[in-house]
Amino acid sequence: MAKNPARAISLNSRLDKFKKNVLLNWRLYVFLLPAILYFTIFHYIPMYGVQIAFKDFYATEGITGSPWAGFEHFSRFFDSYYFWRLIKNTIILSLYQLILFPLPIIFALMLNELKNGPFKKWSQTLTYAPHFMSVVVIVGMLVAFLDPITGIINHVITSFGGSSISFLTSPEWFRHIFVWSGQWQTLGWGTIIYLAALSGVNPELHEAAKIDGATRIQRILHINIPAILPTIVVLFILNIGSFMAIGFEKVLLMQNNLNAETSDIIQTFVYQTGLLEGQYSFAAAIGLFDSVINLTLLVIVNQVARKTSENSLW
Amino acid sequence: MKLKKLFIVMTLLVLILAACSNKNSSSDAAEEEDLDNLTDSGLPIVKEPIELDIFAGKAPATADDWNDVLIWNEYEEMTNINVNWDMVPHEGLSEKRNLALASGDLPDAFHSALIPVPDIFKYGQQGTFIPLNDLIEEHAPNFKSILEEYPEVEKAITFPDGNIYSFPLISDPEFSALRISEGPWIREDWLEALDMDVPETTDEFYEYLKAVKEGNPSGDESIEEIPFGAQTISGLVTYLKGSFGIGNKGKDHRFIDLDSDGESVRFYPASDNYKEMLEYIHKLYDEGLIEENIFSISPEQFYANAGEGVYGSTYNHSPAELFPGEHRDSYTGGLTLEGPHGDKAFTGIDFPSGTTGLVITSQNENPAATARWMDYFYSDEGAELFFMGIEGETFEKTEDGEYEYVEEIRDNPDGLTLDQAVAQYLTWPGGQYPGVLKEDYFKGAEGTESSKEAAEKLEPDFIEEVWPSFTYTEEENNTMTSVGADIEKYVTEMTDQFISGQTPLSEWDTYVKTLENMGLEQYMEIQQDAYERYLSN
């Protein structure tokens, strides 16, 4: 500090400024308090439990009392026969979902071009509706529709002379069924944020463009898309942050011995070993590994986004 | 300076919360039990009433809340011990049980909680479950005499450290219908329509299935017959193992049995016999003789199909008790099939005792009273109470001394099945309880005439010796839950894949090689040690 008095002063004055700021706007900070408390109590404090990933957790000894095991659980996971299969399946499934990221954007742009009227309302309601269905119901519908004998899809296939396909037990079909049924469920809901962003586009821009003779496509490309680009980037980064976190309940419900080749993912493995077999330390180690990958990806993508588009989370 | 105060309050709050969650729960071990409160013997068990909190697994078939069921209210009055049942449905049982065990906030005991054998030992070693040896010696005379009568049961429930940690369900070894519980069933009227006999060899079984598919035995064009259907393929695999000379030590061991040298343990899913069996089952599946979606069928759909009467054969509990619809009585018990090399044995038998049942936790303040509470159900009167209930209220004795439920249960006016009617008063439906099961008192699905008849047909071909689940030391357990679990998972997956043809059987050598790479040798060393320890127990 002594070496650089100017900097010390500026730091002090910045601190003073901050204090002043807080005192002046204390009501706003009170509003912030519940959120801070929530995150502290339910997200930061429980983190001390992560240490069981490096311990042999004994219920009677508690979290702090259990003996240390070092990286034993991690190496056991890396050496496991299923390690590469789990990684591969998790990544492919995540990538597949990520590739479809533009779908709700396209859909939102299309909805935005519709005149306000009953047709627009209907299409919005119809596409939002599946979002409110429970995963269990969705999988129940999949099982019923895709049944090789009684399912409606196979009825259609056989009536056109094809032979019925056992969708739910073939590993080749699992990913398509999983991802596309997910898209069907979330497409409408995913458009909401984009539609909100689109409603903020200044109508004068469109009018001016129209007078200049721009076509509808040109206006979408040069007015609408640039307007929602920041939203797209932020949502994309957030998506990356949960890249490896696939909705595991649905995978679990759709899983069977025959499609395990593609449906066995890290989360179902954690559920199996942690909750069903009670190997908490091992499951915690796998979960931690998963989170570290997510965090790393998030940081990298955020960095890239900041460098290239000036839009980023921080 | 209001803000400063606020910050201080907030920080304190966080610290207090953190301190709370850090509270170590292991310190409050049970206090020394007041043995003076116990009566000398018999009922009641305690002089001053005591309370027990018991965690119980709730099978779908049993009553929702055992606190309101006749048997437990009656037993409470008999013993002076008031049990607060904490019912946990089977769907979330493993999760809830594991969470209860991990949180350190324990009930006094776990009843019917399906605790896996390795877990019993793990938590026994950690001190969560208490060893029962001394309690059995001093406070459980009925259980002790059963162990003396059946030393093989004592062998099976003793862990590598020499301790017993659980009161199991012991079934009368002579009660064969119960020991197989699930068996093969064939449509009798279709056999007649096709002019065939109950299949006795694997070839005849194939012929029958083929005939069902092609011969339209139902005589109804609108019904598309399914020659074999079940909830999972594993039943058929169990049925056929004996015909291919594998699985010779019973149903508790899905991966190992005794090799022909009579000394070493064999990993039979890597044997040629297993391959041959898979070839046979694959042939059935390939020709459409097995329900096509057997690998993904839901129980509801299976029973819906069964109600329509489309199945020509199945592997299940007695259809007369379980299937809906008019065809439920058309099934007759199947026979043990003779395989292509003359092997003929029925291997789908359970060891007469489980290892899981009731365990007492370290937080129980009345372990001796709890042991005596449990011990009563190992006596004849206890078994009578547990399975039949109270004379005059739920059962009557017929003139020749047989037990029979009262008419309201046997032929329920509201159309309930026997199990459903019984569940209003007693808690045995659903199974997994500790106690002793004798043919005289047991009237469940396995105790009905159709089940007994079917079991009698299979009985001559029962394998001679049945192994119980083995117990492993802590170190062995670590390998069994990692390498072992991977191997078993691989075998289970590949078995289904070979049967469905998703992986052709020409890949068999790769499969065996993979198993070896996964650490089969290590796995087998442990199994061999466990077997030898079982022998010398």
Image (cartoon, helix red, strand yellow):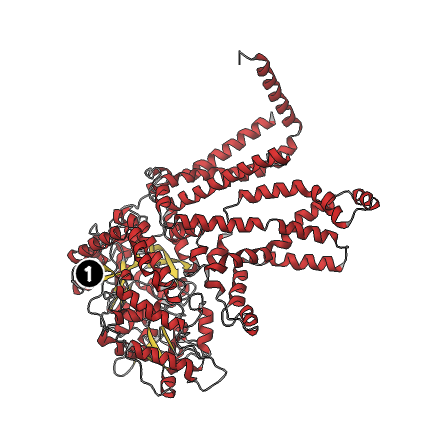
Is residue A6 rendered to the left or right of residue B449?
right
Is residue A217 rendered to the left or right of residue B322?
right
Name the image quarter holding residue B140: bottom left
The location of residue A83, given as percent across then percent down, is 39, 48
Question: What residue is pinned by disc 1?
Answer: B144
Q: Confirm whether residue B44 shows in the render.
A: no
- Give the residue at x 42% y 82%: B214
Q: Secondary structure at mark 1?
A: helix
Which of B202 and B82 lies nearest the eye of the viewer? B202
Q: Which residue is outermost to the right?
A: A211
Say few, some or many: other residues with alpha carbon within 10 Å of mark 1 (under 14 / 14 to 19 / 20 or more).
Answer: some
Name the image quarter holding residue B448: bottom left
Kind of residue indicated by mark 1: Lys
The location of residue B496, given as percent across then percent down, is 38, 63
Which of B178 and B404 lies nearest the eye of the viewer? B178
- Give the residue at x 43% y 77%: B226
The location of residue B163, given as percent across then percent down, is 22, 52
Q: In the rendered view, would you say B363 is above or below A48?
A: below
Give the quadrant of the C terminus of chain A: top right
The location of residue A166, given as percent across then percent down, is 48, 66
User: In the rendered structure, the residue with mark 1 lies on which chain?
Assistant: B
Which of A301 and B286 lies nearest the eye of the viewer? B286
Q: In the rendered view, would you say B18 is above or below B425?
A: above
Is residue B422 rendered to the left or right of residue A310?
left
Q: Confirm whether residue A209 shows in the render.
A: yes
Q: Which residue is outermost to the front?
A: B506
